[in-house]
Image (cartoon, rainbow, N blue to C red):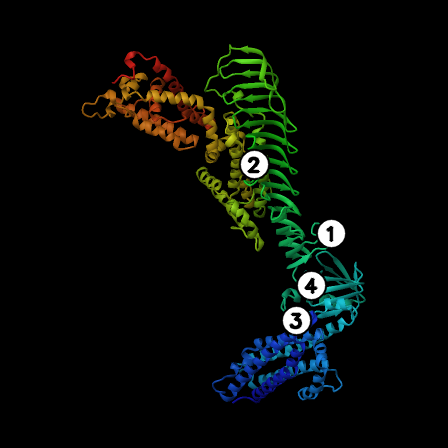
Amino acid sequence: MCSPEEEALLQLEEVFSVTLDHINNLVLQPLLKAAAEPSDPWGRECLSLLQQLHRSSRRLWKVTKESLHSLQERLHHPDSFGLEALLLLHSADHILQIHIEYIESYTSCVVVNVFQKVAKRRSEYWRAQRKVLQQFLSGMSSEGSVGTVLVQALHQPLAHHVQQYVFFLLSLGDTIGEHHPSRELVVHAAELFGNLQSFMSQELDQAMATQALRYTLSSRVGDVLCTPSRRLLQDSQDIPVTVTPLRSERVLLFDDSLVLLQGHSVHTFDLKLVWVEPGQDGCMFHLLTPEEKFFFCSKDPQGRVVWQWKVTQAVCQALRGKKDFPLLGAGLKPSEPPSCRCGAYTFLSEGRFCQATYEGEWYWGKPHGKGTLKWPDGRNHVGEFCQGLEHGFGIRLVPQASEDKFDCYKCHWREGSMCGYGICENGTSEVYKGYFQEGLRHGFGVLESTPQAPQSCRYTGHWEKGQRSGYGIAEDSDRGERYIGMWQADQRHGPGIIVTQAGVCFQGTFQADKMVGPGILLSEDDSLYEGTFTRDLTLLGKGKVTFPNGFTLEGSFGSGAGRGLHTQGVLDTAGLPPDPGSTQPWRQLGLGAFPVESRWQGICGPFQDFVRAGCPGDLQEALLGFHVQSSKELRKSQEYLCCERTHPEDHTGRMEDILEELLQHREPEALQQCLRKALRNSLHPLGKLLRTLMLTFQATYTGIGANKHLQGLAQEEVKQHAQEIWAAYRGLLQVALQRKGQALEEAEDAETRDLQVHGLVLPLVLPSFYSELFTLYLLLHEREDSLYSQGIISLSLFPDTKLLEFLDVQKHLWPLKDLTLTTNQRYSLVRDKCFLSATECLQKMITTVDPREKLEVLERTYEEIEATVSRVLGQEHKLPMDDLLPLLIYVVSRARIQHLGAEIHLIRDMMDPIHTGGLYDFLLTALESCYEHIQKEDMRLDRLPRRWDLREPW
């Protein structure tokens, strides 16, 4: 059986649905008809508000009919249709939301007097309908205006209906008892509609207050402030309050903004960006906005409490984006607004941000976190902010005067200016990748023209306050020149080297971009001029020329129009030509002019700063640079940042893993593997450091810089880079130990450091520089390698036994047992069979770039030669030097290793000092002797007796 309360609810829904039909037919439809075809903006707004009210009224009527249907089902089938199946109970929240939508639509019309204004258009019709409306409106005055009647007609039935809902639901709850399974639903619905009563009352009060406010303001200000969606929460005319420093005449608190009226000026502040400072007492409290700090002062503490509470709750409500229910301040927790928020604001005060709109995260009135700045002139900054300034990674676009071109800065910022690593693309003309300080290029950086630029140029080096300063490499492709040396104030200044595409090198002192004083000119054929030059590098004045054959010319040099170079001096033909294998200092430029330990301090300096700061993950990009795979990925980084700044991996967590790995791999073998892995990883700090050093090396020694006179400069640079990598590892290890609270390692002495650098680090980093470095060795030893190649060709004409005889190898050492003869074949015709295992072993020397591994190959070759001799003699035999050298010459000639001179010199220069005087040193010296002998073999063959004539058949 259904309870009386359920029957009463059914009757209530029937009456209300009929009432809603009457309201629709008698009020809403005529109002819509009267407002149709508006000719002005105000009329269009009225029509829009009435259409919204009509739609919400229809939804309310529809849900009422659905509720009525469920009650009827319950009445007719009480056994199969339980109480919990009533729409009013199981969908109470949905019904409540539809009621709220109607109330908000209705009060929006009240705020702007829609009913009164539209009713004037059909005043006779409304007077005729007054009696009809009185039939379902209680307490309606017969003397009220038509507008008042319409306001009551659209509000009173709903208020009465909700009141009856609450009454019957409470009664139903008492009737079914505490233990009924549906009691919780009934109590919940009664509570919701009870709160709805309070909400309706507050909404109507706020709407009426906002409507009344319009009449106290000028029409212009009233139209701006009293919009349909806005509600007045507090007026300083009700509870007086003064605001400084603006000294406002009137303060209005709306549900979305705070308004200060001062004469004809209206200052509006979005509540989402208003902060109320906590802990205020007395009669004053403080408000913060993005550009202002206000002091609110009331006449008494009670007034201050009311204002502070209402502003605080209004801010909370604005941040939640929906009205508090049922009353202001009764919304969701927290009741205190958060310090960190998101919002948009256009700055008005003079300064860098003037007229710029910031959208993003805020903290106590200042941009803080991720956000976007847009200026009216097209500038755009996307990135991280701290305390109101750009701070952290950010991208800025600055439009150029020409259309559709931008300067794009992708870099780290500190306190409002670029600081740390960044990439700047100047339109389509040039790209700078390097470090900034206070918004200017400062530290190490690379400036390079793009393929679209009219002039091609590249600078790799140091900067100071936006200008090239310190050590740097500049390439001028149009002139075919590369400058290697010192800079000051964007000009070549100090010691420097110019390398030309023709192979000519100049070294001297530069001032104001020109070479001054004495200098050196070194040509590709090793002709050397020492003397003075003009500012455009023409020989002028006293000087001395040393020719490749040892002759010298000393005197005065000059040039004139159409006369070419002319000289007056003394030619000395008594000098001897230099040894082709020697690397005299005068053949190498730059040694001593640029101390190797200070050349690239701009690269190592940020790494040292990173280590001194304790390797914080959030500074890794700023100090060590950010990893970009390609220029295409770089262009995408604008999109990458726009919405959410995310990294492929968390820098802080990754740094912890890196340091932990260093601690766990400190034993020599494990350390070598750990360093190899780190140096191969472009995201590892050591890997980043190595790649930057590789970039400088390539910028110096490739292309025009691939000049044999720079080999010494390059060789000492590679060794220095190995030292810097080791120092960087030691710095990271000290940080790892410090974080774990472990004892720090003692400082290394120079000897221990050199052993680690040459034995551990150099073999790991050398492959990264090997291609460019070995090219320089090839060029430097090209002449002697050419003689060596001629000797190899000549010796290759010998069969094995004749070559052994020619090299004076004792016959009892000949491995004739290894020779397998076919029918009618003689020993004298067999080629490339003797000492074959040693020959094949030596050929492996060119398969590795590690000097130590090359020496190990040489050692195994020596062992193979001795093993072969021991097998021939039938006993273990140690070869003396007199026997070893001719056998080694034989093996080297059969191995036919190209550019052996370059290989030998590179091994000698890069060899671990620990091997000096040891077996490796002995074997390398023996190989050098073989190399020198083979260079001279071609001359020996010319002097052979007739019986050695190689042109005769054997």
Q: Which mark is residue 330?
A: 3
14 w.r.t. 452: above or below:
below
Cα–Cα gap, marks 1 and 3: 40 Å
Q: Nearer the viewer, residue 640 or 678?
A: 640
Residue labelled with disc 1:
350
Q: Earlier in the sequence, mark 3 or mark 4?
A: 4
293 w.r.t. 830: above or below:
below
Cα–Cα gap, marks 1 and 2: 41 Å
Cα–Cα gap, marks 4 and 2: 54 Å
Q: SS of the residue at dot 4?
A: helix
Q: Nearer the viewer, mark 3 or mark 4?
A: 4
Mark 4, residues whose alpha carbon is within 10 Å: few (<14), some, or many (≥20)? Answer: many
Q: Amino acid at mark 2?
A: Ser
Q: Which mark is residue 456?
A: 2
Q: Earlier in the sequence, mark 4 or mark 2?
A: 4
**Residue 127 rendering spot, x and y as whole percentages:** 72, 85
Residue labelled with disc 4:
271
- The residue at the point 37 percent across, 17 percent down is 938
Is residue 478 visible in the rendered image? The answer is yes
Q: Which mark is residue 124?
A: none
Q: Nearer the viewer, residue 406 or 519?
A: 406
